[in-house]
Amino acid sequence: MFTGLVEGLGRIDRIEVEAAGIRIELIPPQLLLVDETGSSAPVGNGDSIAINGCCLTLVGWGGGRWSFQAGEETLSKTNLGFLAPGDHVNLERSLPAQGRIGGHFVQGHIDGTGIVDQLDRDGEWLTMGIRVPAPLADLMVAKGSVAVDGVSLTVVSVEADRFTIALIPHTLAATTLGQQHLGGTVNIETDILGKYVKKLMAGVQG
């Protein structure tokens, strides 16, 4: 479980094609390599880390690098297959039991991808429009929550196959959303509450 509050940007160092997917090796920011005392950060093989909002298992670490594996199903539902050395990704470690929930409940299970089709700047602020498959838009409501590339955001408006979000200067500077461009592909995870409500209502109507 995650909260959609990105802890830092990682930089892709190497992508290696494997039989059933790819291995991703990245360099996390220094703040995720050490804790407040300067000791090594408490990460280890098997830990869950969200990369652009997609929950992956840490399969190797050391030397200032983290390694992950992504299979065909993950690559078909996310933008991880488009990554190349030098690209930046949003990173968030899983939520500890005693942690604060500053965003919303994010599972790290990507529902699909969206295409950026609007970038309107107003000073240091940015309104971003994202086109998504209609079934995903159907799970969103204005003022509700959505995770875009792992970033917890508030939905501004929803149409049949797209939605908009408003990005503050901090979000633009601290996440990959500030590097997005028209036509860019982003990972989308809709609010889990909407999924359960839709499932329950389908049972009632049936």
Image (cartoon, rainbow, N blue to C red):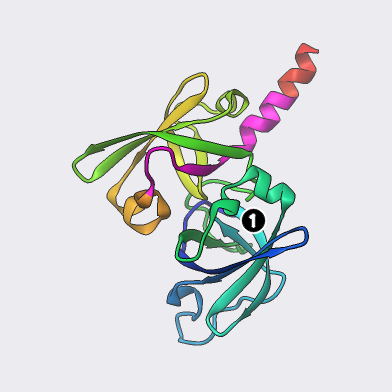
- Mark 1 crowdedness (10 Å alpha carbons): few <14, some 14-19, many ≥20: many
Relative to 1, say whether 126 is above or below: above
Residue type at mark 1 is Cys
The answer to whether 99 appears left or right of 198 in the picture is left
Camera-side residue of 15 and 197: 15
Is 46 colored magenta in this rendering?
Answer: no
The residue at which mark 1 appears reads as 55
Residue nearest the viewer, comparing 130 with 20? 20
| Residue that extends furthest to the left in the rendered view of this protein | 123
From this view, report whether residue 3 is shown above or below residue 41.
above
Question: Magenta span covers which residues?
Answer: 180-199
Q: What residue do we see at 46% from left, 63% from top?
A: 7
Pick the front one: 76 or 92:
76
**Direction from residue 159 to residue 139 in the image, left or right:** right
Quarter in which the N terminus is drawn:
bottom right
Residue 26 position within the rendered picture, expressed as x and y whole percent measured from the top left:
54, 70
